[in-house]
Image: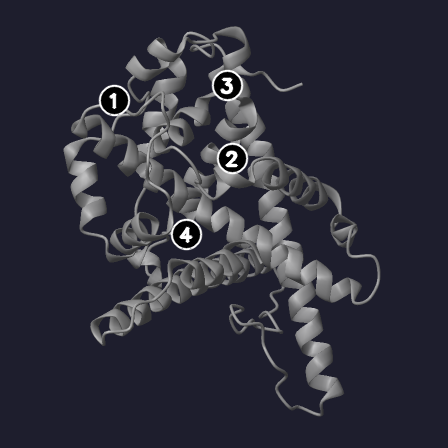
Amino acid sequence: MAPHRALSFPLSCAEEAARASPFKVLKADAAKLGNCDAFRIIRKLLANQQDCSFCATHLQIDSYDRENWLLQRDITHALIFPVLELYRHASNVAKTMLGDRNIFDLELVFRGEARGAFSWLQCFIAEEEDWCLTRGCPACIVSKVLEAEPTIRIILVACRLSQSLRQPHTSSTELPMFDFWLSSLRNALREDPFWGPDFGDHLERRATLLEHGLDELVSQCFEIEALASKHSSIGNSGRQGKAHAYAPVKPTNLRASKTPGKERLVAATAEKSWMQQIVLGCWTTLLADAAAAKVRRKGGLEVENGLVEVRRLRCVTG
């Protein structure tokens, strides 16, 4: 059983209500997020589509704390979003490979560390669906991050993924930056009475294992789709098949090199670009949906929140 903070340090309702967020957001970092169009739209979507009301325990907090919890809830959502999208895309790759065969064993399409990472995400998302989609009281969602090892692990990995998606000289500059959140999380862990400074290295190692598994999952998805694209091109006599709604155009022939190390570097670069395009594609779809909804509202047509939410959830979870 994974370590669980609430089991060792249960709090009364009064103590829970008085507890401030363990995470700190500096004004400079908040200002950077505020200047990011993608993050602003995410915030507007969450404000319109999610129930932003607080539970009875946190109902009496002041307006400053309320805004702080809401901001940190939105940061949590934006961090988890790319991880869910990669899982969704890997699931679609596995379903395509299995065809009409057993779709309940999707992990069998992958091997090694990739299979372990896929299975872990599958179980985690199934057990924590509401938290992954940030449903419920914003203060409870943020506080839950430090409650157990799995939630800490996925946030650590999500922070690292956010950094890797913002490589220089790419189109990923439009994505929000969450480098500060990784430092804030580590500080919160060190100061927490349950986790403390001695548990940090263990948590980082577990996160690194999951991160390596996700890297391998991306690599195997890239290989499978490149191979499927090549076979499709041959089968259709060069005609281009119908692409997945969010899938980028993938190279089917990496430039070979006589130097194995250089060849691996070329492959790794292509896989990273592929991953960036997948996540950026879903961000683009999300932003386009928001823009379209705004245009319809300006035209006098009210868009029901449910319709927009269905599109967003389909994009995130498949």
Residue marked by disc 1: 60
In this view, the residue in front, 104 or 271, is 104
Of tags 2 and 1, which is closer to the observer?
Answer: 1
Residue marked by disc 4: 165
The secondary element bearing badge 4 is classed as loop
Residue 313: give x, y in percent of width and height: 50, 56
How many residues crowd mark 3 within 10 Å: few (<14), some (14–19), many (20+)?
Answer: few
Instruction: Specify whether 248 is left or right of 46.
Output: right
Marked residue nearer the N-terminal end (1 or 3): 1
Callout 1 amino acid: Gln
Instruction: Specify whether 61 is left or right of 254.
Output: left
Residue 86: give x, y in percent of width and height: 55, 53
Marked residue nearer the N-terminal end (2 or 4): 2
Callout 3 amino acid: Asp
Against 157, residue 291 (above or below) is below
How many residues crowd mark 2 within 10 Å: few (<14), some (14–19), many (20+)?
Answer: many
